[in-house]
Every structure is written in C-alpha cells, then in structure tokens.
Image: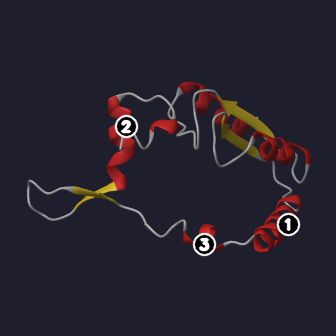
Amino acid sequence: MWVISESFGPHTPAQWLALSRPMVRPVSAAADSKFRLHYDPAIAVPFNLATEGSAQRDEKMLWQLYDNIAAATLVVRGAQSDLLSRDTAHAMTQGGPQARLVEFEGVGHAPTLIAQDQLAAVAGFLLA
C-alpha cells in the first residue's frame, strides 16, 4: 500500500495505517490470511472504453455543468497530479464559479487533507 499510494504525499506510518486500513480486506478469516485491495477493480473500465469523440462530448457536458455552479468552490490539487492537469485546474478558476485553487507540492492525486497546510487551506476557505 505504501508504494502504490506514494503519490498521495508524505505521511507518517500511523497516518498511512489510518488511510489504508479501509482499502484492504483479508482474503479469509484465517489469522494468517493474505490481504486484497477493497475497491472495484473494474473502476477504470469506462475510461478505457472512451473514444476520442465520446471523451470530447463528455468533457463538453462536464464543463457546461461546471459553468452552472453558483456556490463558492475550492479546487484542491496535488502539484504532481497525473489526473488533474495544471491547465484544467487553472481553467476551473476562470469559468463557472471561478474557483479558488490551492496546490500542494510533493503531492500527486490526491491530497489526503491530513497535513496541517492542507487542513488550513480547506478550513480557511470554509470559514471565509
């Protein structure tokens, strides 16, 4: 878990345990059971089925929906994210709710909101 979750940023062993415990399940009830990841392994299938045309259509629809958001919005991005590009995050500050963007260095996708600087950014937004 530690290696595959490395892009979520630096965490203490205790923080990793708290974060990863819900993501694994024992294979059996035996005390020496191995563990398996607890999520839908087919989660990426719809992304793999997308064509260039369907992806463009879906992205256009999502931007139209985004442009209708009226609530104050915070975009939280790990600076090394491989899912939310810097360009897309910046575009989110220009359209729709004109979101406030905060980025965290040393974090990919996605910030876990455990580090104090991450908590402070979210709290500051919510309490503003």
Name the element at disc 2. Answer: helix
Q: Are marks 1 and 3 in contact (CB under 8 Å)?
A: no
N-terminal of the pair, mark 1 or mark 3, is: 3
> Disc 2 marks which residue?
16
In the rendered structure, the answer to whether residue 73 lies left or right of residue 48 reads right
Check disc 1: other Cα within 10 Å, few if <14, some if 14-19, many if 20+.
Answer: few
In what element is the residue under mark 3? helix
Q: CA distance from mark 1 to mark 3?
A: 17 Å
Q: Label for residue 60?
A: 1
Distance between the alpha carbons at the discs numbered 2 and 3: 29 Å
Labels 2, 3: front one: 3
Which numbered mark, 1 or 3, is in the foreground of this view? 3
Q: Nearer the viewer, mark 2 or mark 1?
A: 1
Name the one closer to the observer, 126 or 24: 24
Residue 77 lies, with reference to residue 51, above or below; the image says above
Front residue (pair 75, 40): 40
Q: Is residue 119 visible?
A: yes
Q: Is residue 117 left or right of residue 53?
A: left
Residue at image location 58% in from the left, 43% down from the top? 110
For disc 3, the neighbor class at 10 Å (few under 14, some 14 to 19, many from 20) is few
What residue is shown with label 3? Answer: 46
Splitting the image into 4 quarters, where does residue 60 fall? bottom right
